[in-house]
Amino acid sequence: MTTTAASKQALGAYGEQVALRHLVEQGMVLLDRNWRCSEGEIDLVLKDGPALVVCEVKTRSSLVCGSPQEAVGVVKLERLARLAERWREERGVHPPEVRVDVVAVLRGPRGAAQVEHVRGVV
């Protein structure tokens, strides 16, 4: 693994931890993390009251390449909706509501990371 790949992986892991802490502080309960199947990966699966939440976490260290939210396009959101269904089938879970959220983490050179939680993008 090159330094660039390692630093991107470390930034992503940092962002997921920040996002998870933020969501748990909001009262959500973690059910699964980095769940994978042949179609892709879900960063975080949580319970928010009766709702099942599939959460995509995007982390950036600057806005040079755009905001973290801009990195989550329609194709990714459609895949996350399919992955949510696969996760539910595998676990035999049938919540009354399923939603896809995005948590954008911006880690600047100093201070605490900025976190933006967008609920129900799908």
Image: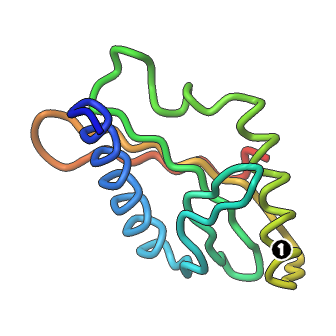
Q: Residue, x 56% and y 58% (percent of image)?
A: 43
Q: Count numbered badges in the picture.
A: 1
Q: Residue, x 58% and y 50% (percent of image)?
A: 56
Above or below residue 10? Residue 69 is above
- On the rendered image, what quadrant is the N terminus found in? top left
For the residue carrying disc 1, how many other residues have a C-alpha within 10 Å: few (<14), some (14-19), or many (20+)?
some
Q: Is residue 41 left or right of residue 2?
A: right
Above or below residue 40? Residue 26 is below
Q: Is residue 32 left or right of residue 121?
A: left
Q: Identify the element where label 1 is drawn.
A: helix
The single residue placed furthest to the left in the displayed view is 110
Above or below residue 113? Residue 50 is below
Q: Position of residue 121 (x, y in %)?
A: 73, 44
Residue picked out by circle 1: 88
Task: Please say which color scheme the image uses.
Answer: rainbow
The single residue placed furthest to the bottom in the displayed view is 92
Q: Residue, x 83% and y 74% (percent of image)?
A: 88
Q: Is residue 34 left or right of residue 114?
A: right
**Amino acid tagged 1:** Arg
Q: Quadrant of residue 83?
A: bottom right
Q: Position of residue 75 (x, y in %)?
A: 77, 31
Q: Residue, x 19% and y 49% (percent of image)?
A: 112
Q: Position of residue 34 (x, y in %)?
A: 54, 63
